[in-house]
Amino acid sequence: MTAAGPSPARRGPGRRPGSADTRGEILDAARTEFADRGYDGASVRGIARAASVDPALVHHYFGSKEQVFIAAMALPVDPGEVLPDVLAGDRDQLGERFARLFLGLWSDPAFREPMLALLRSATTSERGAQMLREFVASSMLRRVASAVDAPDAQLRVATAAAQLVGVVLLRYVIGVPPLATATDEEIVALVAPTLQHYLTGG
């Protein structure tokens, strides 16, 4: 009879280390956390707990809660990367920069298609709407409002965003002519002064 080999080492209690599918499991846990708690209520620690991993792994794969959300919701753009350029520069041209950024992003199918899917989800699912609403408020509107020197800055920014969303819905989703066939420059020329008024009162 051969002697039994040593018993395999057993890992003690605690969070499991990363595995081949750790990133996917974190994203699954993040979607549940964001749906149950909203964007503001969710945390990296809570996402890690739900995925049974150490919070350091969440930071390793994604960096921050905002980046986890962007990956979990398959957002095609990171507001933290595109907004600083818009907010920098002459305040009197803020409306024009916003119009150019927004129309430029939506003219790219790589951005437009996933965003349309996300918007459809938000209009048919209260959970989807809540997640998107809180993320937009926390990650986008507050950033822009901080650059708008007015007591009602958040309302001004939200109204400007509503103007732009209306334009892209008619242009790219419904395809209303002549908005659907106009050039970006033509639309910027018409929309930018209105956005400027919303944002700065100018």
Image (tube, helix red, strand yellow):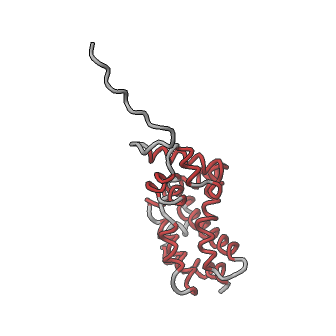
Which of the 4 quarters of the picture holds residue 42?
bottom right
Q: Is residue 39 above or below residue 151?
A: above
Image quadrant containing the C terminus: bottom right
Front-lying residue, 177 or 159: 159
Q: Is residue 125 left or right of residue 75?
A: right
What residue appears at the point 48 percent right and 73 percent down from the top-left corner? Answer: 183
Which of the 4 quarters of the picture holds residue 22?
top left
The spot of residue 72 in percent (x, y) is: 51, 52
What residue appears at the point 43 percent right and 59 percent down from the top-left corner? Answer: 110
Residue at the outermost right position? 151
Q: In this view, does 65 lie to the left or right of 199?
A: left
Front-lying residue, 148 or 125: 148
The spot of residue 89 in percent (x, y) is: 51, 85
Which of the 4 quarters of the picture holds residue 93?
bottom right
Q: In this view, does 125 lie above or below 180?
A: above
Looking at the image, how many numbered discs can be counted on the residues?
Answer: 0
The spot of residue 199 in percent (x, y) is: 64, 79
Image quadrant containing the N terminus: top left
What residue appears at the point 51 percent right and 42 percent down from the top-left corner? Answer: 14
Residue at the outermost left position? 2
Q: In this view, does 49 lie to the left or right of 153?
A: left
Residue at the outermost top position? 1
The spot of residue 3 in percent (x, y) is: 29, 18
Q: In this view, does 114 lie above or below 177?
A: above
